[in-house]
Image: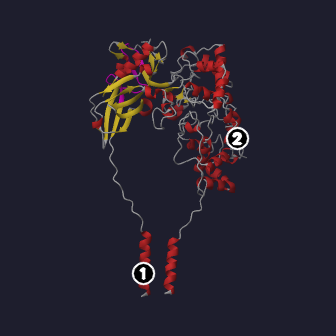
Amino acid sequence: MKYLLFLFIGVAIFLSCKKDKVGHVPTPYVLEIPSHFPDMIIPEDNPMTVEGVELGRKLFYEKKLSGDNTISCAACHAPANSFTDPNQFSVGIDGVLGNRNSMVLINLGWQNFFFWDGRSKTLEDQILLPVPNPIEMHQSWPDAVAKLNADMNYRNMFFNAFNEEGIDSIKVSKAIAQFLRTMISGSSKYDVMYKFENSLPLSTSENATLLSIAAEEWAGYDLFKSLNGADCFHCHNGPLMQVKKFSNNGLDLSFIDFGRGAITGNANDNGKFKVPSLRNIELTAPYMHDGRFTTLDQVIEHYSSGIQTSSTIDPLIEYAFQGGVQLDAQEKSLLKAFLLTLTDYDFINNPDFQDPN
Amino acid sequence: MYSKFIVYIILAIAVFSSCKDDQVTEPIPVVDYLKVTMQPTFGTNELLLDQTFTTAEGYLVQFTDLKCYFTSMKNSSNELCQAALYDYRETGTLVFSKPGKPADYSSLNGFVGVDPLYNHEDPSAFANDNPLNIAIANDMHWDWNPGYIFMKVEAKVDTIPDAIENFDHFVIFHIGTDAFIQPISLPSITWTASGTGLYTLPLKLDMQKFLQNGLQTIDLKTEYSSHSSAGQEVLSLKVIQNFKDAISFY
């Protein structure tokens, strides 16, 4: 009888035993989306969490991701320059120059394609590429992951962010993507102008900003969106200050860099590059995919008189036949005044985007 | 004696522990879908973007973009589709695909363009999957107007008949604003069964008719740009009327 009782208890214990998972449920991260922006679509397999964003921020500034531990993502996307590189081309760890200007990291959660040629369709995919790129961080992912794995703090942070042990490149890209999605710019003077023009409600502080907008800035905005003025709005408008497309904006008669055409293999795409947002343009020199222009004045002059007509030029550059929109000195000045309204000081000074180390 | 008893207990425990609620699978209701497509043509030929066609005037034309909104598509008060964005380059011939039964939509009436009910709403406030959401509308919304571009035709033209192809003449028709919205009527629809629960209505958009709509012709050499601005009313109206008239059953 005693034997039977032990057996019964043993079986019961055996059946009730299961491996309890000691876990940490990550805390959902609530994004603060500006009221005039559309929702940000978050990938189902990479929900935003407080722990993921914190980890992504640390990884963004982590030099161990490069082969010789000298550069991080922030090396080519510096906070002081609105997360781009003030140099025409970025330098990789081996001293090799890239051939395109570093792109601005701003409002990435609303983008549908990444890189100047759009070769990555998700932020997570994009993040995977610079680490093994021989002219950038030049390190295999297994080596990068091994370095992170050797750090107990990272092991804990990854566990807390993903509620499972282990580090891999996918988790690295997911965490950095979560951080980058928090980098939202929507509180420049332009945002107030946009909301005002679209009859959207303004807060008290926005009403105060509205009153501070100078006549020159409004006049520049009028030029910006005028067909017979600067005619910029075809490619740059809306809350994101960009249209999601590829365009040949008349930089060259012939192409050294085929841009989108190199990805699609379609000659009609040659010389086309992603239309960037103009947000924080004051801070993001040099300009264009190859960083050929060092000042905003040069950019304005290009669209005013420097347009080169090639077979794939964007038809929306309606005054290409005369070299551009032919602005006079005063118009250029007004246009520039408007472009400066796109600077978002809250964004660039946001402590949540700075190096946590 | 003991061993028999033990076997019973173990069996009982095993049976007990293996018990779980079986999921009762509910039958999935069958939903019919109504799909509208629109194939661009140039006369009797199917039109591909960037392909060269010859106009009645002898110009060579390559269409580079064809887009339009259809909104408030309904049969009486029964709405099938609030808004659809036709974008030939990005999404091919699809106009929309919505749940509905053919018998409920023997005709459709609506607008080419964006119903004034929605045209001036905050474009960020529409549902994420609504074509009027700015994230989908993309370059089909004018924040400066403000409102949507109802239809867009972009093309490159060679107007010089010298046998040398030189498409340096751009055509840009961006028509919007409430004054130019066009009601469209599709009577006596025959939905074609295209698979289980799927019914299709194929339309065509004849760009030859767009240019040569009876007496209402568009000469691309002299009539090549409109953004619906003041002073462009006559051309704007002709463009969107011709565009609507170019749409028919395929």
Q: Is residue A33 left or right of residue B170?
A: right
- Alpha carbon distance from label 1 to label 2: 67 Å
Reading the image, the residue beneath label 1 is: B7
Please give the range of residues in magenta: B38-61
Q: Which residue is drawn at the image coordinates 62% and 14% (left, top)?
A: A327
x then y, percent, for residue B96:
38, 34
Q: Which residue is drawn at the image coordinates 58% and 26% (left, top)?
A: A196
Q: Is residue A10 left or right of residue A97?
A: left
Q: Is residue A306 visible?
A: no
Quadrant containing the C terminus of chain B in the rendered view:
top left
Q: Is residue B167 left or right of residue B102?
A: right
* Secondary structure at numbered mark 1: helix
x then y, percent, for residue A154:
67, 53
Reading the image, the residue beneath label 2 is: A351
B212 over B77 or under it: above or below: above
* Secondary structure at numbered mark 2: helix
Q: Is residue B49 magenta?
A: yes
